[in-house]
């Protein structure tokens, strides 16, 4: 346990360990580390430190351990479930990785890049592109989120269908453990069966088992052609059939398949500057379909046209547009990527990041929509996401012109409706954003007790004092 007296001595020791540049003292800067991107979660901290090297991270962890103080790792602070924010006690130390921004190595023949945890995702994409390679993880927050955060949350995004989640993209890790030792697991090997694959414990652990300081990531051949289409659909069932039509023709050149309800697009049209509906009339649902290839002239436009022809014949598509240049591609993606931010402008956004088997998405949407409309007449369901991999952001906004507080007060009850429906379709209540504090207590009801027991065993082994991101992921008890 920390005693209040331990904190001043800890602060002085932290100052010595990371130097003045590594201790954040400006009140505005400190505040930005204590609240998440949406302003949905906030806390207090004994200190905010920004170490510049793995050795400095290890020193901070050892000092905090000596003082019995919890450490909250933080990357770009774009997470959506409160995992990177300290609790309200003011007794935790926020450890920001944002000064660890070195690309340590790019090995084109091995198709790998070795980067520090604080490197922003977009910088990795750019470094790969400069070497005529692709780093495929892609998500709306890519200009600010970090590789450490992407690994710690096992981020997904818009290219999972083709390249997998962050877990599939990592070959090796360097991790500062709870006892202050550093595990040097930065191996760039595609085959390595030397016992348990320890790196996967830290991927998706949200900082509760150790602090990722660097990683070896997979690279892929650069993409040289793309085709992007925006398709109006009668409903989610047509979306699921359309995936099959496109996949049958395009194989793994199908890179992205995003789906959004009219309500989702309407929010973007209302709030995002310059957003424009590609069609003259409104349609119930939309898909954003993207194919890509390593060949410059791969004939992707014809593949999309053939797929859409079949979709129109089978009444799966109501209208469609194939983007004719990079500006139009960007405009279509902006309609999709703008949903999260646009929804925030409509009052509280109750987020439910779920997966169900792709085949069950239509029935899931129908059942859940019905249950919610019965619970809150006029509720606005903002359902959209990476439907190609089964992931829906089944978010909720209050009925128009109703009260924020009254809607927020029903958040837990409405979440139950969504999650009960999710598990009734053999789905997961946490698809790509993680658990953090937002879903921590729900694990007691929705996670298999044996899995929870095993997770607690792993936590006890790697972090016996419970100082790695305390209060996140695992429910008390
Ligand atoms: P943070 O928010 O700083 O931290 C997230 C978690 O990781 C916390 O628990 C933190 O303690 C832990 N952590 C951070 N760094 C480390 C480290 N080095 N070692 C150990 N633990 C660490 N997510 C998706 O998966 N797909 C999307 O499509 C997507 N789109 C988004 C769009 C927008 C507009 C926004 C705001 C967010 C989106 N997200 C998405 C969520 C978020 O961007 C991801 O979860 C991202 O991976 C978080 O990275 P970060 O660096 O910001 O991590
Ligand atoms: C997305 O796919 C992100 O746009 C954010 O995962 C989802 O804000 C959300 O709920
Ligand atoms: Zn998403």
Image (cartoon, rainbow, N blue to C red):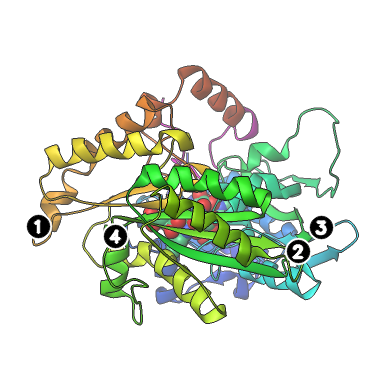
According to the image, label 2 marks what residue?
294
| Residue 146 located left or right of residue 447 | right
Numbered circle sitting on residue 403: 1
Question: Do the numbered discs 4 and 3 sit on residues whose CB atoms are within 8 Å?
Answer: no
Which structural element holds mark 3?
strand
Task: Note whether residue 85 is visible.
Answer: no
Q: Earlier in the sequence, mark 4 or mark 3?
A: 3
Q: Find residue 93 and report its horizontal and vertical position in percent.
A: 50, 55
Q: Residues within 10 Å of mark 1 (few under 14, many from 20)?
A: few
Depth check, front residue: 441 or 93 = 441
> Could you tell which of marks 1 and 2 lies nearer the N-terminus?
2
- Few, some or many residues within 10 Å of mark 4 (<14, 14–19, 20+): some
The disc, 3 or 1, on the residue closer to the chain's N-terminal end is 3
Range drawn in magenta: 461-477
Which residue carries the number 4 mark?
283
Tell me the tag on residue 222. none
Q: Residues within 10 Å of mark 2 (few under 14, many from 20)?
A: some
Residue at left offset 27%, top offset 66%: 267
- For the residues carrying marks 4 and 3, which lies nearer the camera in this image? 4
Cα–Cα span, label 2 and label 3: 18 Å
- Mark 4 or 1: in front is 4
Is residue 472 highlighted in magenta? yes
Q: How far apart are the alpha carbons under marks 4 and 3?
A: 43 Å
Residue at numbered disc 3:
112
**Magenta segment, prevailing SS (helix, strand or loop):** loop
Indicate whether residue 406 is drawn in magenta: no
Q: Kindly state the secondary structure of the residue where label 4 is placed.
A: loop
């Amino acid at each position: 346990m920390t005693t209040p007296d331990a904190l001043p001595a800890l602060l002085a020791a932290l100052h010595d360990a990371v130097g003045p540049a590594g201790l954040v003292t400006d009140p505005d800067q400190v505040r930005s580390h204590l609240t998440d991107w949406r302003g949905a979660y906030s806390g207090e901290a004994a200190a905010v430190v920004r170490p510049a090297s793995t050795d400095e991270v290890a020193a901070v962890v050892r000092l905090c351990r000596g003082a019995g103080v919890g450490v909250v790792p933080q990357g770009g602070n774009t997470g959506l479930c409160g995992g990177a924010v300290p609790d309200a006690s003011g007794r935790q130390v926020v450890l920001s990785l944002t000064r660890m921004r070195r690309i340590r190595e790019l090995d084109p023949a091995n198709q790998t890049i070795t980067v520090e945890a604080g490197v922003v995702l977009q910088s990795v994409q750019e470094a790969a592109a400069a070497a005529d390679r692709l780093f495929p993880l892609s998500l709306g927050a890519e200009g600010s989120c970090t590789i450490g955060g992407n690994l710690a949350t096992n981020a997904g995004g818009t290219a999972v269908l083709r390249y997998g989640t962050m877990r599939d993209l990592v070959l090796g890790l360097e991790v500062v453990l709870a006892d202050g030792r550093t595990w040097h697991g930065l191996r760039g090997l595609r085959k390595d069966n030397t016992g348990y694959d320890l790196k996967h414990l830290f991927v998706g652990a949200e900082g509760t088992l150790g602090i990722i300081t660097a990683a070896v990531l997979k690279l892929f051949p650069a993409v040289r052609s793309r085709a992007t289409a925006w398709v109006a659909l009668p409903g989610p069932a047509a979306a699921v059939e359309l995936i099959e039509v496109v996949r049958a023709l395009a194989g793994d050149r199908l890179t992205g398949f995003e789906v959004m309800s009219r309500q989702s697009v309407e929010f973007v049209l209302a709030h995002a500057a310059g957003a424009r509906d590609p069609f003259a009339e409104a349609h119930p649902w939309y898909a954003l379909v993207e194919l890509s290839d390593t060949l410059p002239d791969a004939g992707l436009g014809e593949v999309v046209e053939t797929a859409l022809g079949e979709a129109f014949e089978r009444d799966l598509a109501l209208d469609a547009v194939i983007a004719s240049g990079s500006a139009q591609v960007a405009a279509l993606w902006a309609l999709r990527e703008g949903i999260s931010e646009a929804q925030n402008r409509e009052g509280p956004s109750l987020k439910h990041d779920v997966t169900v088997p792709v085949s069950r998405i239509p029935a899931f949407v129908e059942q859940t929509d019905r249950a919610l409309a019965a619970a809150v007449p006029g509720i606005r369901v903002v359902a959209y996401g990476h439907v190609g991999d089964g992931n829906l952001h089944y978010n909720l906004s209050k009925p128009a012109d109703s009260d924020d507080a009254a809607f927020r007060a029903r958040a837990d009850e409405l979440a139950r409706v969504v999650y009960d429906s999710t598990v009734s379709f053999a789905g997961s209540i946490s698809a790509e954003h993680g658990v953090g504090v937002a879903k921590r207590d729900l694990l007691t009801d929705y996670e298999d007790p044996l899995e929870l027991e095993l997770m607690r065993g792993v936590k006890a082994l790697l972090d016996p004092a419970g100082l790695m991101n305390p209060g996140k992921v695992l429910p008390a008890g």
